[in-house]
Amino acid sequence: MSLHSESIRMRTKSMQVTSDTIYALSSGGLPSGVAVIRMSGAKALEVTESLAGSLPAARQAVLKTIRTRNGLVLDRGLVLVFPGPNSFTGEDCAEIHVHGGKAVVAALLAELATFEQCRLAEHGEFSRRALENGKMDLVEVEGLADLISAETEMQRRLAMEHAAGGLSQLYDGWADRLTRARALIEAELDFADEEDVPGSVSDLVWSDMAKLRLELADHLAGADFGEIIRDGLKVVIAGAPNAGKSSLMNVLARREVAIVAEIAGTTRDVLHVDLNIDGYAVKLYDTAGLRDTDEVVEREGIRRALRTAADADIVLSLAEIGERAQLEFPGFTGRVVRIGTKSDIYPDEADGDYELRISSATGAGLAELHALLLEDLRGRSSSLSLALPSRTRHRTLLSDSLEALTAAVASISAGLDIRAEYLRRSANSLGRITGRVDVEDLLDVIFSEFCIGK
Ligand SMILES: Nc1nc2c(ncn2[C@@H]2O[C@H](COP(=O)(O)OP(=O)(O)OP(=O)(O)O)[C@@H](O)[C@H]2O)c(=O)[nH]1
Ligand SMILES: [K+]
Ligand SMILES: [Mg+2]
């Protein structure tokens, strides 16, 4: 077993480790044209053979009649086997593709349950086994989960980058550089009197580490954008009562999400819809109109409105063009877009000082609002690459790694052993993102690049 899977096994020890063969309906809701039932574990092939009469060649789809052990025909369908370790989980795996009728699938699952040591898989258990067997690292598993829940094109691309190992490759590459630097330093420390070690490698090491520090900082700066792609851009509609906030929400959502009325103070709760703006997920919030009031429920609504605005990426501050309201959003440091509403009844272009003038009634200005949001989104990324961190977990560990690397580079007057220790910590934090360890690599580099074992 590799050190990698060893470390993951240790980390996941608290999880249930069993030798059960698991099965599940891996395709979506029923009824459907085809339903895929997946199996993984020691008995997967034996069970498949029992159901299909014989086993197809590895990784080849063959049409079979699927029967219970009593000879009752369940269905005809494609059968595939993936003997381990060349499978998704690393264990023996099989797939049976049957017709996606509820009774067909129920009958097949019931038959599977009759086999010893076979049981229905728990949530994510196939992926967990793949992780435990070193088939995927943590970032890839997270990416796979994101890929399955992706609803917009950008979410899909980001998830694909993670699931396919793009991000892991980056982190592994950096961890290798840190390990190499440490190896060179350790060699200088331990074997400085031996001839085979280059005299002073320090300059090379530290200039590469300074470069790596910049790359890491640059990458970390992309976390904001990565999180916005994954979680959606938070856009909050705020403004005075009757400014037309709920009307805008409804027209952007293309359905009657919020109650619209002439009565000021109609909206109390924070309402929310998910939009897809050219492939980007946008979370749009409608909030209570902001004003001084003694009414208890409305006051609570206003408190929630301000709290939601404080958390926003963008606040759309709406005011009826004739009203000229000036609003404050305490705690919010992002972009406020001042929007004048009901332009259909205020045709004078010179009225008020607004970035945009809209009418939810006629649709005027909505294309410009759409363009503004899209431009804002695109402006948040400095590169075209989607190898971006997208979770708080990534951000925290990358910050730890950067902090340690910064300390290593900056501690010029400290001993090499101390600086090497900072490098170790930096690599360790990267390794914790993907779930890899680097001890073995360190030894490999030391013993392969220098003939110090003489
Ligand atoms: N002419 C015109 N009327 C509008 C427009 N947008 C909204 N209104 C009207 O303005 C009134 C208030 O609209 P709402 O969307 O409920 O306003 P709001 O900002 O959500 O109000 P509160 O929830 O009470 O804070 C309603 O009578 C709407 O029909 C518009 O673009 N043009
Ligand atoms: K209203
Ligand atoms: Mg409203």
Image (spheres, helix red, strand yellow):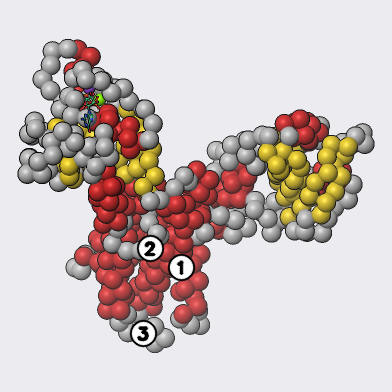
Disc ID at residue 442: 1
10 Å crowding of disc 1: few (<14), some (14-19), many (20+): many
In this picture, residue 262 sits left or right of residue 51: left
Q: What kind of element bears circle 2?
A: loop
Q: Is residue 120 above or below residue 90?
A: above
Residue 110, compared with residue 134, is above or below; it is above
Residue that appears at 58% across and 41% down = 124
Quadrant where the N terminus sits is bottom right
**Residue 212's image quarter?**
bottom left
Q: How far apart are marks 2 and 3 (CA)?
A: 37 Å
Who comes first in sequence, dot 1 or dot 3? 3
Residue 216 seen:
no
Amino acid type, label 1: Leu
Residue that mark 3 sits on: 198
**Callout 1 touching callout 3 (CB < 8 Å):** no
**Which corner quadrant of the figure contains ligand 2?**
top left
Between discs 2 and 3, the one toward the N terminus: 3
Q: In which quarter of the image is residue 288?
A: top left
Seen as rendered, the residue at the extreme right is 71
Give the camera-side residue of 166 and 266.
266
Give neighbour class at mark 2: few <14, some 14-19, many 20+ (Cα, 10 Å): few
- Is residue 140 found left or right of 196 in the rendered image? right
SS category of the residue bearing label 1: helix
Three-letter amino acid code at the position of disc 2: Ser
The residue type indicated by label 3 comes to Pro
Viewer-nearest of discs 2 and 3: 2
The reply to whether callout 1 and callout 2 are in contact (CB within 8 Å) is no
Q: Name the residue under label 2.
A: 385
